[in-house]
Image (cartoon, grey):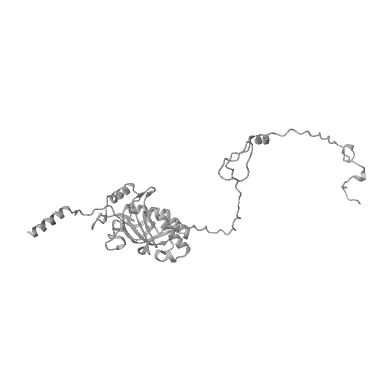
Amino acid sequence: MPFAAAAALMLALAGCSNYETPRRQAWRGAAEKACLAQRPFQVSAYIQPAREIDGPGICGLYYPFKVSALLNGQVRLNSAYTLDCPMIARLDAWMSETVQPAARARFGEEVAEIAAMGAYSCRTMNNQPGGRISEHAFGNAIDIGGFRLARGREISIRHDWWRGDEQTRAFLQDVHSGACGEFTTVLGPGSNIFHYNHIHLDLAMHGNASSGPRRICRPLLGPSPVPEPPRDGLPNPPEIDEEVDIAENVRPAEGAVPMHAGPGAGPPARIPDALFAEALRLPPARAYAPLPPQPIGAPFGQNSASRPEGKPPDWDLVPSAPAR
């Protein structure tokens, strides 16, 4: 009898339990379908569709792609990685709008290859036992370990984030801060002990804020100053400190023209119309005495009208021929 009672109790508890298999969040499939409808990239030798990945558990993608290069083959990946459509589209935008401009500004050349460290992987966050499922388990994340420039220079996040030269560290700071505007999660060196050697990028759903999707960006960095363009060999231009006249925040009296600085943004200075009318008025015609008629036919000195004043010894005349 006690055994029957215990069995009945176990059956009752089983009836109250929920043994439903965990399901992938609905927004993931919706995001993949919405991205495919927009066609942000073309299927090519660098981006190939793959078969649906279903499991184990909730891991997987509905419409996975094998990606070996970005920007239509312009930037290679060090291997082929499995990613979903939204991540491919955001990676293309990040490369064209942030990474390549930063590389041109810092090094005078573009990035030719990305050294990635992983994309799709059915695992927990940071591979911690019992941890939350990672965005890598849905092909919605990628880890960036470094870059290789067009002329062969390699940039390693593990080394150059802390010990690189000034331009290299500034470049990595630029690409990290630019990623925070493209992805919802960006974790780089300094965010925690697990990201000391790479930048993690994903499009996890963290909820919405008044300004849009809520984002996680660590460490929070600002864009570093862009270097000056190469010198052309000419001296620097002189510094000019021009004075700026700002009208006072009071209306000037009728006909007054304020010419000194004042606080606030007042009405612009206005020159009275009377000054314009006075400037446009033509001056009166001046009377000039008529010139005397010039003698015709008489040589200089024989006509009294052309003879200089005074006596001949006072005349300042240059002889036409030297005295003999």
- In the foreground, 266 or 165: 266
Quarter in which the N terminus is drawn: bottom left
**Residue 48 in which image quadrant:** bottom left
289, above or below 156, in the image: above
- In the foreground, 100 or 76: 100
- In the foreground, 81 or 290: 81
- In the foreground, 129 or 249: 249
Is residue 137 in view?
Answer: yes
**Among all residues in the image, which is located at the extreme front?**
2
233, above or below 30, in the image: below
Q: Position of residue 186 (x, y in %)?
A: 37, 57
Residue for point 36% across, 64% down: 193
Q: Position of residue 318 (x, y in %)?
A: 87, 47
**Residue 55 in which image quadrant:** bottom left
Q: Position of residue 171 (x, y in %)?
A: 44, 60
Count of number-bearing discs: 0
Is residue 153 in view?
Answer: no
**Among all residues in the image, which is located at the extreme left?**
1
